């Protein structure tokens, strides 16, 4: 199938694989910015690769190679042009592409359930192909299109169940093709059966305790297996209301004595007298969230990591935004130290329990971890 310059430029990221060499050479000769992010060209004599619109002088034709991605060029030993920064162009265009893909997947989540719509059909509706769809998701979010669709279905299911819909109605409205698929995943994703969730956690046994700490109040909730939630707030009433909103019919029992060992450990940690926390957890997570949270628990006390560093550590260097979302979804503050993740410039960014608390946590940890002579 032939691809001319005008039709291919309609969506460069989607059509990049279909470009002929003639189309790419024409785009480079014209310095056409529509193709920035769709491919890069590399020059054998300088060992540099550029975006198509790079203002630099054009090389001889026999010295030019084309690559679909900056990574492919770098694997062959080329380095990015410092004038046109082709690596950032590819990322920017791909992020825009991803936003359009997410909208399309949101529209077709129910039809895609249980394989009734294949990834090829889904990609076609979004104006791309299956391989490109998978690559974009892996690079930008660190998950597959299927995992994203699963998360959207689960979100819809929870909304329907909370709204009072029957389990049968909710599972089909949310896009689950069969009850068996839902029930086999429910304990891992919901922490209970769908019927229990619809009943507000009616059959869930949760003990909790609220104690004062240097940051206000901290609530610790636990199942028989371990800590399910750690929340920070200004008052006991506020934190109890937070727990009730999630599980309005759960069997909640205040148990300060039974949870005393854990609340004392967390309080000492907040005060800086117990740097290491090794407490059992019983939290529900997607595979990606669990990888992020495990990496967060490896960050040494008194130090920080950027979102980009965490993304690289889990093998998903372009999934910074997905890492940020996983940090925001962390149900067990302090025990999973998402407060130790900061912006690339080292400054604290958003924190579910308040940016001032995040700053206070980091300040305490830096002070306590510093050698005595430097305090």
Image (cartoon, grey):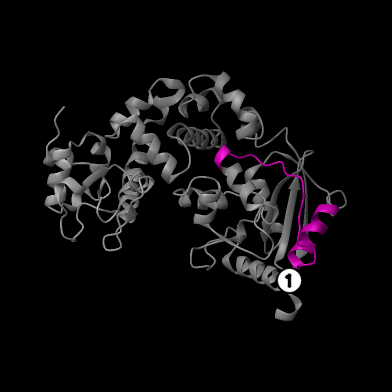
Residue 262 lies in magenta, yes or no?
yes
List the single residue furthest toward the right.
Answer: 257
Q: Is residue 335 left or right of residue 338?
A: right
Is disc 1 placed on a helix, strand or loop?
helix
Residue 70 versus residue 157: which sits nearer the camera? 70
Residue drawn at (50%, 36%) of the image? 151
Q: Percent from the top left, x then y, of residue 290?
A: 61, 42
Q: Residue at x 71, y 39 (%)?
A: 250
* Residue 308 is inside the magenta segment: no
Residue at the outermost front position: 45
Rate crowding at label 1 as few (under 14), some (14 to 19) or many (20 or more) other CA atoms within 10 Å.
some
Say if 344 sits above or below 316 in the image.
below
Q: Quadrant of residue 364?
A: bottom right
Q: Which residue is mark 1?
A: 368
Quarter occupied by the N terminus: top left
Residue 231 pos. (x, y %): 68, 55
Q: Which residues are magenta?
A: 261-288
Q: Is residue 113 above or below residue 30?
A: above
The picture quadrant where one finds residue 369 is: bottom right
Residue situated in front as seen by the camera: 328 or 91: 91
Q: State whether residue 282 is above or below residue 267.
A: above
Residue 375 in sight from this viewpoint:
no
Q: Is residue 150 left or right of residue 192?
A: left
Q: Is residue 365 left or right of residue 88?
A: right
Count of labels in the image:
1
Q: Quadrant of the C terminus?
A: bottom right
Q: Position of residue 352 (x, y in %)?
A: 58, 58
Q: Position of residue 126 (x, y in %)?
A: 30, 34
Q: Is residue 132 visible?
A: yes
């Amino acid at each position: 199938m032939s691809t001319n310059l005008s039709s291919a430029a309609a969506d460069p990221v989607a059509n990049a694989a279909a470009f002929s060499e003639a189309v790419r050479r024409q785009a480079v000769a014209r310095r056409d910015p529509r193709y920035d992010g769709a491919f890069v060209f590399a020059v054998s004599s300088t060992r540099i690769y550029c975006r198509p619109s790079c203002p630099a002088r054009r090389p001889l034709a026999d010295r030019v190679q084309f690559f679909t991605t900056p990574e492919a060029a770098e694997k062959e030993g080329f380095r990015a042009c410092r004038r046109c920064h082709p690596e950032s162009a590819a990322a920017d265009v791909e992020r825009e592409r991803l936003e359009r893909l997410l909208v399309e997947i949101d529209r077709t989540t129910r039809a895609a359930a249980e394989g009734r719509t294949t990834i090829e059909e889904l990609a076609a509706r979004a104006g791309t192909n299956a391989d490109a769809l998978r690559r974009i998701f892996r690079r930008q979010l660190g998950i597959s299109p299927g995992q994203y669709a699963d998360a959207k279905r689960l979100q819809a299911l929870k909304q329907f169940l909370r709204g009072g819909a029957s389990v049968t109605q909710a599972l089909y409205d949310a896009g689950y093709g069969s009850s068996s698929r839902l029930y086999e995943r429910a304990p891992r994703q919901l922490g209970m059966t769908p019927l229990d969730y619809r009943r507000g956690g009616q059959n869930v046994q949760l003990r909790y305790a609220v104690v004062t700490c240097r940051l206000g109040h901290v609530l610790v909730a636990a199942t028989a297996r371990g800590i399910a939630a750690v929340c920070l707030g200004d008052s006991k009433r506020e934190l109890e209301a937070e727990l009730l909103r999630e599980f309005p019919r759960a069997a909640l029992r205040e148990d300060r004595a039974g949870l005393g060992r854990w609340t004392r450990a967390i309080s000492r940690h907040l005060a800086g007298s117990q740097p290491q926390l090794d407490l059992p957890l019983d939290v529900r997570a997607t595979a990606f969230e669990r990888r992020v949270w495990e990496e967060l628990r490896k960050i040494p006390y008194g130090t920080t990591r950027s979102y980009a560093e965490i993304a690289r550590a889990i093998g998903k260097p372009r999934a910074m935004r997905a890492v940020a979302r996983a940090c925001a979804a962390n149900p067990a503050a302090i025990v999973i130290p998402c407060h130790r993740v900061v912006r690339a410039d080292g400054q604290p960014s958003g924190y579910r329990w308040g940016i001032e608390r995040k700053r206070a946590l980091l300040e305490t940890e830096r002070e306590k971890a510093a050698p005595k002579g430097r305090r």
